[in-house]
Structures are given as C-alpha cells and as structure tokens.
Image: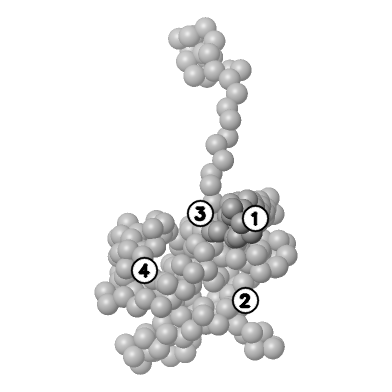
Amino acid sequence: MFRAVSRRIIRCNPFEHAKYEKEENKIRFLQKSEILKLMSMRMNDKEAELARQMFIFSCFTGLAISDMENLKYKHIQTAADGQMYIRKERQKTKVEFVVPLHPIAEAIISHCWNAQARNEEQQTVNEKGDSLVFQPHCSRSVMGKNLSIVSKACGIRQRLSYHVARHTFGTMSLSAGIPIESIAKMMGHASISSTQVYAQVTDRKISEDMDRLIAKYKAKDKNTTNAKTNTKTIPLVVNSNDRKEETA
C-alpha cells in the first residue's frame, strides 16, 4: 500500500488508520496423567520411539525442537554437587539458557549415549562430546507424523508437537512453585514477558478448577436439600375406634 501511494497509483492508504486486534493464542499443554501415559508406552518403530523420547525430554527440559536437534554431549555439564544441567544458546534467540536435568531427562540422555556407544565403540571421549544427543534420520514433517502415531497409541486426543512439550514444561515448572525468573532463564526467553503467559495459564486453570469445585459442592448441597424435601412423611389415620395407627 505504501508503495502504491508513493507511486501515486492510489491517492491514500485506505488502511492507514485501521486498528487490529491481536488474537490471543491459546497455550496447549499436557496434563500429568497424559505425560505418564507417554512414559509408559514404548513404541516398536525406531523413529516413533525416538520422537516419543524427544517429546518427553522436551517436557522435562523445555528445549525447543531446534535446540534438541543441535544438542551435543558437550552442552551437558555437571555441577560441584553432582547435579547435571544443560548450558547452551537457543537457536532461535541466541540467548543462553541453563536448565537442571530432571532424572527422567538424565535417563533419556544415558539411553542415547549407550545406544550410540554400541555403534561407535572406536570413538574417543572428545569426539563423542561433539556428537549429537538425538540423531533423527527423518524430516520434521515425518517426526510430526511419528508424534501423531505416538499420541494415538497412548490414547491422547490432543495433537502432539514439540511446542506443546515446551509449553508443558513451562506450566509444570510454574505449578511446582519455581519462580518465574528462573523459568525464563531455563527456557532461554529474551524477555520475562514471554514467560508470564504461563502464569496467566496457571491462574486461569486454578480459577477453572475452583469453579468446578464450587459447582460440585453446590450440586451436592442441592441434592441433599431435595432429598430432605422429598422425604416421605408417615400420615396418621384415625380408626373408628378412635385409635391412631401409622400407615406407610
């Protein structure tokens, strides 16, 4: 439009004073019960199994798919107290992130290391340090299809993606009481405003849970009240001999 105006093709930009409303994107994430289903289901297909492991890894580390594709063993370090963690720059923003490894994430890395060690016994430790942790032999579109296979096998209706896994990490971390500043550092957000969306999601979920709890108790009280109101009374019948008898 600006080019058309500058070339005098049109006299003015008809959208110059137009206002646009930003559509709020709904954050999609998994519940703990769904993550447990993923953890308990092992896939027979090699590529589908790798997609499942990478998804679970992202749920417990918050790594995006591009970061997992470029994750090397040299990015995994060990602190003085023995805690393993990942220190790396995000591929998207080039912001450094540091995330401690959950035992489940450690187990996945150990599994990948052992699997590669069987195939690369002649490699030195230094060479292995430059090796990729995850080595998918397919495109991202195929990985997405593999995730669809995994979700159907686990009975999860929600469409799985590595964005969903990353959002799951953010919401789970906040629900666990981790400060939002720490979550921002772990997820490699350039601004804390990107992390605050998880606080909004968590607050909304708490509100919805509370609304359901209140509705549940209201329904329970209503049923109790109705039960008391509908209690059948036993009438008194006076016989001809003036003796009162109770009849149902």
Residue at mark 3 to residue at mark 1: CA–CA distance: 75 Å
Residue at mark 4 to residue at mark 1: CA–CA distance: 74 Å
In terms of depth relative to the viewer, which is nearer, 204 or 62?
204
Q: Could one spot residue 70 in this view of the protein? A: no
Q: Which of pointers 2 and 4 lies earlier in the amino acid sequence?
A: 2
Q: Which of pointers 4 and 1 lies earlier in the amino acid sequence?
A: 4
Looking at the rendered image, the disc whose residue lies closer to the viewer, 2 or 4, is 4
Q: Which residue is mark 4?
A: 154
Looking at the rendered image, the disc whose residue lies closer to the viewer, 2 or 3, is 3
Q: Could one spot residue 103 in this view of the protein? A: yes
Q: Which residue is mark 1?
A: 242
Looking at the rendered image, the disc whose residue lies closer to the viewer, 4 or 1, is 1
Count residues near mark 1 (Cα–Cα under 10 Å), then give few for <14, some for 14-19, many for 20+: few
Q: Amino acid at mark 3?
A: Arg
Direction from residue 168 to residue 117 in the image, left or right: left
- Cβ atoms at labels 2 and 4 below 8 Å apart: no
Secondary element under disc 3, as helix, strand or loop, is loop
Count residues near mark 3 (Cα–Cα under 10 Å), then give few for <14, some for 14-19, many for 20+: some
Q: Which residue is mark 2?
A: 100
Q: Which residue is mark 3?
A: 28
In the displayed orientation, state which residue is furthest to the top. Answer: 11
Q: Which of pointers 2 and 3 lies earlier in the amino acid sequence?
A: 3
- Please determine whether, in this image, residue 109 is positioned above or below residue 238: below
